[in-house]
């Protein structure tokens, strides 16, 4: 990753797209790293979806994961490799859980999962990344949007709960909430 990012930064510097000041270089380096890592995560999850014959689930998972996490934050692995591994593993486990539990959850279990998810998002969100601090005015806005978006998505999952897609929605939002707890645990351990 470092080699690839360095090559890209060197190339755009040589083309006079960005200056060679270290602050500018660091800014672009970080942006390029995040972009490549995010794109790689998307590609790997879609490939995993194809390999385990759950392509629709991979698209649902990615869409919800990217949308909700942009407002709630969550767990961040220490390396890009661990991030990619965690993303693929959590997708595969969620898709397999969906295969097992689709149409088997009672309405009560679905409502409990939704309530627990909403409670976690309401209490913990948004989770701050050490590389991307959140000021107080933005924190309140992100919290409200995170709660509302998660609620709308969960209500959609509830409405579709007797379908394969509905269960995938509920399980994915629940996973995102669990990853928020994992982020808080990691944060406390590092303090």
Image (cartoon, rainbow, N blue to C red):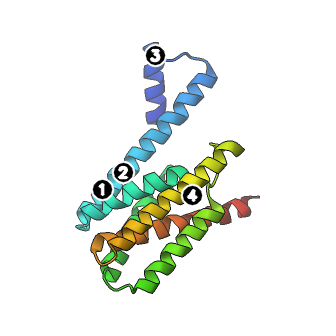
Tell us which disc is closer to us: 4 or 2: 4
Q: Which mark is residue 74?
A: 4
Question: Could you tell me if the residues under marks 3 and 1 are in contact, i.e. CB atoms within 8 Å?
Answer: no
**Alpha-carbon neighbours of circle 2 within 10 Å: few (<14), some, or many (≥20)?**
many
Which residue lies at the image location 38% right of the left edge and 45% below the top edge? 39
Using the numbered discs, state the Cα–Cα distance from disc 3 to disc 1 in whole angstroms: 32 Å
Which residue lies at the image location 72% right of the left edge and 59% below the top edge? 190
Q: Where's residue 179, x and y in %?
A: 55, 65
Using the numbered discs, state the Cα–Cα distance from disc 4 to disc 2 in whole angstroms: 17 Å
Question: Could you tell me if the residues under marks 4 and 1 are in contact, i.e. CB atoms within 8 Å?
Answer: no
Is residue 182 visible to us here? no
| Image quadrant assignment for residue 96 | bottom left
Question: Could you tell me if the residues under marks 2 and 1 are in contact, i.e. CB atoms within 8 Å?
Answer: yes
Residue for badge 3: 17
Question: Viewed as shown, does residue 10 lie left or right of 120?
Answer: left
Residue for badge 1: 46
Earlier sequence position, callout 4 versus callout 2: 2
Q: Is residue 132 above or below residue 161?
A: above
Question: Could you tell me if the residues under marks 4 and 2 are in contact, i.e. CB atoms within 8 Å?
Answer: no
Which residue lies at the image location 48% right of the left edge and 26% below the top edge? 9
Residue for badge 2: 42
């Amino acid at each position: 990753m470092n080699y690839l990012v360095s090559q890209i930064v060197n190339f755009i510097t040589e083309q006079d797209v960005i200056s060679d000041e270290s602050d500018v270089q660091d800014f672009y380096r970080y942006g390029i790293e995040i972009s490549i890592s995010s794109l790689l995560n998307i590609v790997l999850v879609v490939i995993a979806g194809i390999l385990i014959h759950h392509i629709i689930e991979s698209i649902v998972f990615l869409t919800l994961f990217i949308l909700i996490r942009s407002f709630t934050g969550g767990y961040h692995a220490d390396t890009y490799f661990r991030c990619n591994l965690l993303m693929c593993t959590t997708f595969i486990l969620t898709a397999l859980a969906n295969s097992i539990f689709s149409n088997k959850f009672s309405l009560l279990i679905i409502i409990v999962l939704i309530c627990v998810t909403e409670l976690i998002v309401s209490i913990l969100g948004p989770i701050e990344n050490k590389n991307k601090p959140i000021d107080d005015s933005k924190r309140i806005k992100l919290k409200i949007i995170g709660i509302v978006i998660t609620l709308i998505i969960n209500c959609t999952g509830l409405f579709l709960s007797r379908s394969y897609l509905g269960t995938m929605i509920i399980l994915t939002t629940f996973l995102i909430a669990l990853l928020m707890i994992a982020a808080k645990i990691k944060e406390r351990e590092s303090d």
